[in-house]
Amino acid sequence: MLARTGAAGGTEPVLSLRGIVKTFPGVRALGGVQLDLYPGQVTALVGENGAGKSTIVKILTGIYQPDEGQILVDGAPVHFPTAQAAGHSGVTAIHQETVLFDELTVAENIFIGHAPRTRFGLIDRKAMRDRAGAILRSIGADLNPMVRLKDLSIASRHLVAIARALSIDARVVIMDEPTAALSHKEIAELYELVEKLKSQGKAILFISHKFDEIFRIADRWTVFRDGQFVGEGLMADVKEAELVRLMVGRSVDQIYPKRPAQIGAPALTVVGYCHPTEFENINFTLHQGEILGFYGLVGAGRSEVMQSLFGITRPSRGACRIGDDVRVIRSTAQAVHAGIVYVPEDRGKQGAVKGLPIFQNVTLPSLARTSRAGFLRLAEEFSLARDYTQRLDLRAASLDQDVGLLSGGNQQKVVIAKWLATKPRVIILDEPTKGIDIGSKAAVHDFMSELAGQGLAVIMVSSEIPEVLGMSDRVIVMREGRIAAEYTGDEMTPENLVRAAVGIN
């Protein structure tokens, strides 16, 4: 399976990478990797966080320059010194998070930076409107090019982002985690778009951690591991277990390593929690040693309840009992003091402090433990950070590394380590494995199970049904800001969770 597989039908690649090396201070991100992208085919690039996928995307789009190696277009060497140069060669990217501008029209967002011009050098607004309309129609988007972006839904904004990427005459389309923020309906529409792009002969690089997507949409696969090329081939010739083995260098026998729970006394009891706009009449009890799953569709109010329990927002009514102490949490400091910590879904903005090294991120809420007489003790900070990051199998050059330079999965591990270092009684994990690879998921799940085994009470908010069912002792389903159902044992089935989430009795 490690041998290079030839292109189906003898088709030559549109774009190839050969021997690409990229080094950052203290980190060799890519060590001589290769990649081939074929016209009319989807190539899935898979690998754990830190495997080098994001670095490759930045090299292909002209943001980074390789230290060694070649980029070939139609077999001829090319150089992408800028993003504009990559675009002129027909390479475009649809990112998970694309910056758009609310006050500009759809057409202006699509053509910002490369708007058509009149012979006098002015922006040709009619041509821009007409071309924007043509691109939108080509992807099946029924949008008025002259509508301001702020008046569109989130799904429509995503279509504008796709149209913007396609506004150049693209031959290679890179999709980097394109479904991360989409609903099931929007994902189905994206699949249809991919089929249209394939029929137009475009070469597509598809990056995703979701194996169901990869096997649903890809024609070919390429695996990177630790910045190295591991193998490539046709999707029809590979099984999921083999891809996992190539990605992680070992067999992942159990992605959801749930251990038998020893349920103890109540650790957290929530009574009558209400918020004017987000949730109403939330009641539940969480026990020591229990993993309590919260499931629901986007907008069901799960994260809002958890943020209120952590003191980010205040409830209008209700209280919670932590052990024998009844209180209303009014600030995050009160929550931490009471033994409640929260690992947010948006780790980049709410979890990690970019610009600070890993060890300072981990010890930030625990400075009382690592200081004496008001002075920080560096050795104790490193010792504390090393203890928790090693238990989570953090991949980093050193604990001095800026947390902002870590992959998404490793940033998540730093945020989890930060709160575990406070020795909480209750830990709330909001989408703890969102956007991280299968190997890191297994490590987070194993550690979660270990924590519950030590008596910690765990709340896990997740939109992934296999994760909810695989890791939870009990599941609460929310719908429209209310608790819709609660399941245990044999009642915990995918059908029951979905029916409760969508309101089917």
Image (spheres, helix red, strand yellow):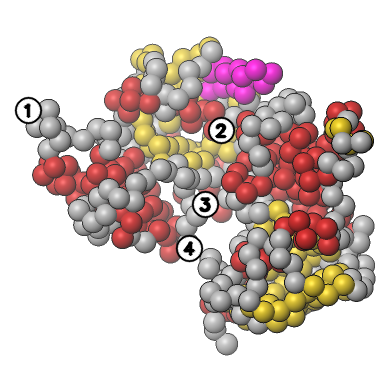
Dot label at residue 180: 3
Dot label at residue 53: 2
Q: Horizontal and vertical percent for residue 274?
A: 64, 78
The residue indicated by pointer 4 is 184
Q: Nearer the viewer, residue 20 or 242?
A: 20
- Callout 4 amino acid: His
Q: Horizontal and vertical percent for residue 36?
A: 46, 28
Q: Is residue 108 above or below residue 325?
A: above
**Marks 4 and 1, how far apart in space?**
45 Å
**Marks 1 and 3, how far apart in space?**
42 Å
**Marks 2 and 1, how far apart in space?**
42 Å
Quarter of image, res 401: top right
Q: Earlier in the sequence, mark 2 or mark 1?
A: 2
Q: Earlier in the sequence, mark 2 or mark 3?
A: 2
Q: Nearer the viewer, residue 419 or 244?
A: 419
Q: Is residue 142 above or below residue 225?
A: below
**In this rendering, position of residue 51 left or right of residue 10:** right
Q: Residue furthest bottom?
A: 505
